[in-house]
Image (cartoon, helix red, strand yellow):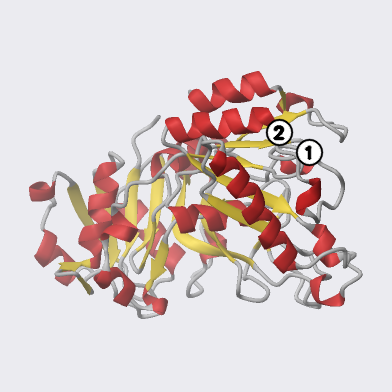
Amino acid sequence: MRAFTAYIIAGDAGGFFAPMADVAGRPFLAWQLEWLCRHSVTDVVVAGNIDVIREHFGDGGNIGMRLRYAPSNGLSFAGSFFSAAALYPCEAYLLLSGKSFFNIDLTWFMRFAYERGECSAAVKYLPDIPLGPIALDDGFRIVRPDRSHDIFVEGYHYGGVYAGRFASLVRPSQAPHADGDLSPAVCGIPFGDRFIDADSGYERLAADPSAYFSAKKSSAIFLDRDGILVEDTGYLASTRDVRIIDEAVLLVRRANERGRKVIVLTNQAGVAKGKFSEADVTALNRYIGDGFQKRGACIDGWYYCPTHPSASVASYRRESLQRKPSPGMLLLACDDHAIDATGALMIGDKDSDALSLPYIRTHLLQGAYPITRRDNLSTWDRAMRAVGD
């Protein structure tokens, strides 16, 4: 992979200046630079309000980096970047906001962005903000959602991390905060990792900065429930009908032995259709988990989506990014359990179990449902070997 030059925008037309904010006795920017070093990014240009930063960090030699500076006060986020790149040009760029931190797998992201050849943005899933500021199409292109109705109750937000080849960019307008102007076709990749910015305050960082900047992440496997953990009887609602699948027990044990988290992601449209309640789903999940535990197989987390766009129960009638194949449940799990999802496994028995993420390896096992995604078709033996890799 090509060497990347990182550009950190330390102040723009919006007037923020967070890089020197104190976080557990160190400037916020120091934590960012340490994170970049761990990903072997050591060529860094700081743009914007730079005087105090230059006085504190100098040329970066004492922290194993080359730091350069580009004054660009009064320009937009994108304008500051282009101004800095004019002084210090590059072939491959990594662009960071100086007021936020998003603990993604930076090495994977830079490689993906370079190979894709266009500006790629890391985006954060927001489950509790109506009408997220951006949406993604099937090709991961960033689009603005239709705000004429409220069918979406969640969305994605820019994570302040961009990468790509400089030659693919078109110079933006100079409007403040023109994030979307970095390219006419920005690609958005969802991540579920820890995110913090100045707008939400740094108090959480000060309490435990390692949880955001340096926490060790776990590998994981993600499993569908019905048809993978237990036999799919159609809207499973009673413990009397639970039949645990023996191969699933062996697979979960193998993941436990390898130190991988085991997370269940299940669509439960039966709630939306009035066949059972969320309490019933929770109780059934607990019962299944106990059954696996008794056989020496530990499941670390359970996530379910109760909504459906054509639900008979009005309160559940909506689209949701948590409903597979959308990746919302997985992204929540990654945040909750400190999981590195790049290269993780998803094992299911339906096309909808092939999640809309470019970094997940999917194994679909033939069961009661037709599988059209033949490239993902697998067997229990192949899934078992993949868990052991």
Instruction: Identify the residue at horizontal 80%, vertical 28% (top origin).
Output: 366
Image position of 292 (left or right of 34): right
Indicate the position of residue 229 as horizontal and vertical percent values: 68, 39
Image position of 279 (left or right of 351): left
Q: Which residue is mark 1?
A: 231
Query: Gap in Å between the C-alphas at discs 2 and 1?
Result: 7 Å
Residue type at the position of mark 1: Glu
Instruction: Identify the residue at horizontal 66%, vertical 76% (top origin).
Output: 130
Q: Is residue 198 above or below residue 30?
A: below
Q: Which residue is mark 2?
A: 245
Do the numbered discs 2 and 1 sit on residues whose CB atoms are within 8 Å?
yes
Q: What secondary structure is marked by label 1?
A: loop
Q: Is residue 237 above or below residue 386?
A: below
Q: What secondary structure is marked by label 2?
A: loop
Q: Quadrant of the N terminus?
A: top left
Marks 2 and 1, the one that precedes in the sequence: 1
Kindly tell me whether residue 81 is visible in this rendering: yes
Indicate the position of residue 9 as horizontal and vertical percent values: 34, 63
Q: Which residue appears farthest toward the bottom when viewing the image?
A: 15
Indicate the position of residue 48 as horizontal and vertical percent values: 30, 68
Q: Is residue 269 above or below residue 242?
A: below
Instruction: Identify the residue at horizontal 84%, vertical 31% (top origin).
Output: 372
Count the marks: how many?
A: 2
Image position of 187 (left or right of 79): right
Kindly tell me whether residue 141 is visible in this rendering: no
Return the mark for residue 272. Answer: none
Q: Is residue 282 above or below residue 255?
A: below
